[in-house]
Image (cartoon, grey):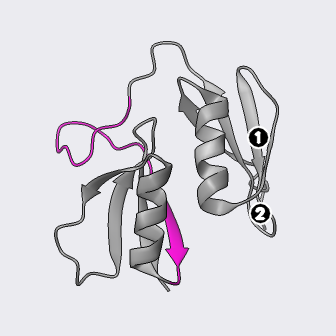
Amino acid sequence: MALAKLGVVVLDCPDPHALAVFYAGVLGGTVEGDGRWVDLKVPGGQSLAFQATPGYVPPAWPAPDASQQFHLDLTVDDMDAAEREVLALGAKPLDTEDRSRSWRVYADPAGHPFCLCAC
């Protein structure tokens, strides 16, 4: 029996509104709030929240001596089209060398790693 339900995943970042807008461009949804805490309500999915963190330092990836902290796997139908869109929204490629894999790794504008994964 579960002791709790997952409420929301919260990403620390320097600019919560800007990062919420980035993920709204990737996932759809509605950005709610302004200031130190912003929510992204994703239709039919788990909401994401973004929290302002003074002195924010992005995770390192890949780095054997530092933690990536966590990452998001985002499932897409068309890997190449999704890649073009996330790059246009401000993502940076971290590992796209092996184009035969079913995933590619990027960083969002605040430096959090995420993967685009083929269905």
Which picture quadrant has residue 100? bottom left
Q: Quote the CA–CA distance across marks 2 and 1.
A: 25 Å
Q: Within the magenta stretch, is there residue 118?
A: no
Measuring 33% from the left and 61% from the top, which residue is drawn there?
105
Q: Which residues are magenta?
A: 58-77
Chief secondary structure of the magenta span? Answer: loop
Q: Nearer the viewer, residue 69 or 109?
A: 109
Instruction: Give the numbered dot on residue 39.
Output: 1
Q: Is residue 86 above or below residue 11?
A: below
Please tell me which residue lies in front, 88 or 103: 88
Q: For this rendering, which residue is in front, 66 or 104? A: 104
Disc 2 element: loop
The x and y percentages for residue 52 are 61, 22
Q: Residues within 10 Å of mark 2 (few under 14, many from 20)?
A: few
The answer to whether one can see residue 11 in this image is: yes
**Residue shown at the point (78%, 68%) measured from the top left:** 1
Q: Is residue 66 above or below residue 7?
A: above
Location of mark 2 (residue): 2
- Residue flagged by tag 2: what amino acid is it? Ala
Residue located 62% across and 55% down the image = 25
Identify the mark at residue 72; answer none if there is no mark: none
Q: Is residue 119 above or below residue 83?
A: below
Q: Position of residue 33 (x, y in %)?
A: 82, 31
When the figure is inspected, residue 65 is found, relative to residue 99, above or below; the finding is: above
Q: Residue at x 52, y 84 (%)?
A: 77
Tell me where residue 87 appears, x and y as whole percent. 41, 55
- Is 75 part of what is drawn in magenta? yes
Hey, what amino acid is under mark 1? Asp
Residue 59 in picture, x, y percent from top left: 35, 36
- Is residue 10 at least partly visible in the picture? no
